[in-house]
Image: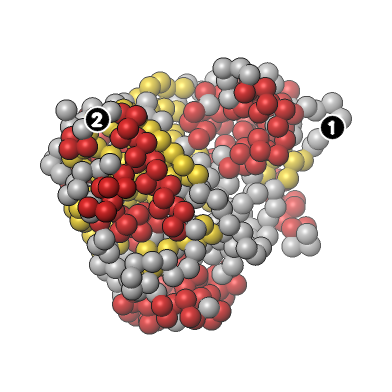
């Protein structure tokens, strides 16, 4: 039996998952890394701690699966896009890892939009500029912590750093790098003139050579083999940006399909053979399938809003879950299901960690009364997140036909109640795949192609991606949610003048 290992590093969690070549999930392990917030707007992590979280997850997966490490024929990584991970000449961290929710460099973004830089670079970059990207972050370091850049040898994305630790070989990977504003996406190369537009021409030599998702980018070293239990010499593929990973892991191999990822970010995307370049869209980047582009609408406005509510306001339910065979999220789902869609008009704006409407926008509940309960508030959160996804999808539909169905991944996909809300808000069938770890599965697919287990992404997806169920929309909810969505939009418009004062 052959196995494929996928490694997924999000903003806080490091996961490893082992699959057979039919996509069956053999074992999964995860380990959390503490998010560091040394100053307002700074979101960082200790890179050594993150690496050891990966080591622990990989080792636990191999031990729990009880497989021969020699039967793991390939490994690949995925991870959150943007942010950045800097290493020095010896391969040690030059600074903490920076997560993509970091906002320290937002003033540079405002400057580049205001002075015409964005419009000049857009034909090459095909994407918006935002504070968590390496371009404004590098500009910030250049002006505020030059000593960090002076000792930096390589600028890595999250998953490229983990691959570097596995193999000792420095590479960037095309899907990840094409979403950073650091490269000329149109011509598929680094571009000195582009970097000059941002005042970053001096960092070109710090950008690693670019490889493709399914290219072999080194092999597991002896030291790593001893740490993790992997076999020395196991091939490691390029891997991919997490938005690509979740898309391929939900079977997005055709232009007709639409994918939603409801995790920390609200990510909504489709693929096409022709790139879409518009200042109104969030991003067009290079897809893992040759000849395809990935058009994405996204913002940090999704299921992390529920995580906040659960952490701060559901401590009683957390304690109850310890004594029952259910999680705190099961309690949340039950509460949401107890409130009919037409029995609460609370509006929740899911802008705790960012926004897709205004840089100064804030999260809020609007319409609370004394008779409302925690269940009403939870339903408002579920609905508000779905409304934000719909706003992104409405923008995408200006450039393509309406799909017959959409596929969903991320934390929200684990809740049938939440999936039903998505189906009702969008009035589309929502397909949910069997794998619980879409990022790791997408990485494993890359490993399978790189090592010759599969001859293409099409054949890999056909073998490893399976639909668990399809959630059909309730037609009787269409008018209810149209009214609620209109109220959601009106609330945003009405509050816009106030946000700057808060």
Find residue 383 and report its image quarter: top right
Q: What residue sits 39% from the left and 60% below the top? A: 157
Q: CA distance from mark 1 to mark 2?
A: 56 Å
Badge count: 2
Measured from the top left, where is residue 73 in percent x and y? 18, 40
In the displayed structure image, the side of residue 452 where residue 137 appears, left or right: right
Please report whichever mark, 1 or 2, sits nearer to the chain's N-terminal start: 2
Q: Determine which residue is flagged by label 1.
A: 369
Classify mark 1: helix, strand or loop.
loop
Residue in front for this viewpoint, 441 or 120: 441
Q: Residue visible at 68% across and 55% down?
A: 361
Q: Residue at x 78, y 59 (%)?
A: 502
The disc placed on residue 188 is none
Q: Which residue is mark 2?
A: 67
Mark 2 and mark 1 in contact (Cβ < 8 Å)?
Answer: no
Give the residue at x 64% y 44%: 350
Judge depth for marks 1 and 2 and give the one in front: 2
The quarter of the rendered structure image containing the N terminus is top left
Local crowd at mark 2 within 10 Å, few (<14), some, or many (≥20)? some
Answer with the quarter of the image where residue 372 lies. Answer: top right
């Amino acid at each position: 039996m052959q196995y494929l290992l996928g490694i997924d590093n999000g903003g806080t969690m490091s996961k490893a998952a082992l699959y057979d070549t039919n996509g069956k999930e053999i074992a999964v392990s995860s380990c959390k890394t503490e998010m560091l917030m040394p100053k307002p707007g700074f979101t960082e992590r200790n890179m050594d701690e993150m690496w050891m979280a990966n080591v622990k997850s990989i080792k636990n997966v191999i031990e729990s699966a009880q497989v021969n490490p020699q039967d793991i024929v390939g490994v690949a990584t995925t991870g959150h896009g943007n942010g950045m991970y800097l290493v020095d000449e010896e391969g040690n961290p030059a600074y903490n890892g920076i997560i993509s929710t970091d906002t320290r460099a937002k003033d540079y973004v405002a400057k580049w939009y205001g002075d015409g830089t964005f419009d000049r670079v857009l034909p090459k970059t095909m994407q918006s500029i935002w504070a968590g990207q390496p371009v404004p972050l590098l500009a910030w370091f250049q002006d505020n912590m030059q000593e960090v850049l002076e000792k930096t040898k390589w600028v890595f994305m999250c998953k490229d750093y983990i691959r570097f630790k596995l193999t000792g070989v420095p590479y960037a990977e095309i899907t990840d790098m094409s979403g950073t504003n650091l490269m000329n996406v149109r011509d598929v190369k680094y571009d000195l003139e582009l970097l000059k537009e941002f005042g970053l021409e001096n960092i070109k030599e710090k950008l690693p050579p670019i490889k493709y998702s399914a290219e072999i980018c080194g092999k597991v070293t002896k030291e790593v083999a001893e740490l993790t239990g992997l076999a020395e010499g196991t091939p490691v593929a390029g891997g991919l940006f997490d938005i690509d990973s979740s898309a391929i892991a939900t079977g997005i191999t055709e232009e007709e399909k639409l994918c939603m990822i409801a995790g920390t970010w609200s990510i909504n995307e489709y693929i096409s053979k022709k790139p879409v370049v518009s200042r109104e869209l969030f991003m067009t980047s290079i897809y893992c399938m040759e000849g395809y582009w990935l058009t994405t609408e996204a913002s940090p406005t999704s299921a992390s809003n529920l995580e906040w509510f659960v952490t701060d306001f559901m401590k009683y339910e957390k304690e109850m879950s310890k004594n029952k065979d259910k999680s705190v999220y099961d309690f949340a789902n039950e509460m949401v299901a107890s409130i009919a869609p037409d029995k609460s008009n609370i509006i929740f704006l899911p802008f705790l960690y960012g926004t897709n409407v205004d840089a100064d926008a804030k999260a809020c509940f609007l319409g609370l009364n004394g008779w409302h309960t925690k269940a009403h508030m939870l339903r408002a959160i579920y609905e508000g997140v779905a409304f934000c996804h719909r706003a992104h999808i409405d923008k995408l539909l200006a450039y393509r036909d309406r799909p017959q169905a959409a596929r969903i991944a991320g934390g929200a996909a684990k809740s049938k109640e939440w999936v039903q809300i998505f189906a009702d808000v969008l009035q589309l069938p929502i397909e949910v795949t069997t794998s619980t770890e879409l990022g790791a599965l997408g990485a494993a697919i890359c490993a399978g192609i790189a090592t010759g287990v599969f001859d293409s992404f099409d054949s890999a997806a056909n073998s490893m991606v399976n639909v668990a169920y399809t959630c059909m929309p309730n037609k009787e909810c269409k008018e209810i949610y149209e009214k609620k969505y209109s109220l959601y939009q009106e609330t945003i418009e009405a509050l816009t003048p106030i946000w700057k004062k808060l």
